[in-house]
Image: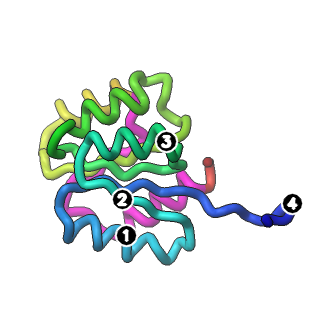
Amino acid sequence: MTEQGAQAKKLILLVDDDKEILDSMQITLEKLNQEIITATDGNAAVELAVSRKPDVMVLDLMLPKRGGFLVLQKIKGSPQAKGKKPFVIMITGNEGQRHKTFAQSLGVDEYLNKPFRMDRLTELVEQYLAKA
């Protein structure tokens, strides 16, 4: 029973196999008052992305069962998908331009190296929620 013009909650999908990072992101992003769902492996991330169609996805690169690049390829698949939902913010502990360039070729919207500041993540998520 949402009224016409009432702001519907947007959906954020957080994906990381590190429970502490996942919990930190979730607690931090809850202040945005949006719906948040989580996954701890790549297969679950793809299932949730396909079934729930999130507005924004925060995706770890190194995941069990299906790595972040394979998830990104399944969800976005090309540079033309950049700027379209779901907006994907990839997070990784891997240094190096090569990984970032490959992620961009698969349509990633943002690429953050760990450790990152939670206020920076919040800022990015807010920007993409506004576009969604």
Label located before the other in sequence (3 or 4)? 4
Foreground pick, 69 / 114: 69
Which numbered disc covers residue 26? 1
Mark 3 = which residue?
51
Mark 2 = which residue?
38
Foreground pick, 91 / 70: 70
Which region shows up in magenta? 107-129
Label located before the other in sequence (2 or 1)? 1
Foreground pick, 61 / 120: 61
Distance in Å between CA atoms under marks 1 and 3: 20 Å
Q: Is residue 100 left or right of residue 36?
A: left
Rendered image quadrant of residue 25: bottom left
* Magenta stretch holds residue 69: no
Above or below: residue 49 compared with residue 22: above
Which mark lies nearer to you, 2 or 3?
3
Q: Are marks 2 and 4 in contact (CB under 8 Å)?
A: no
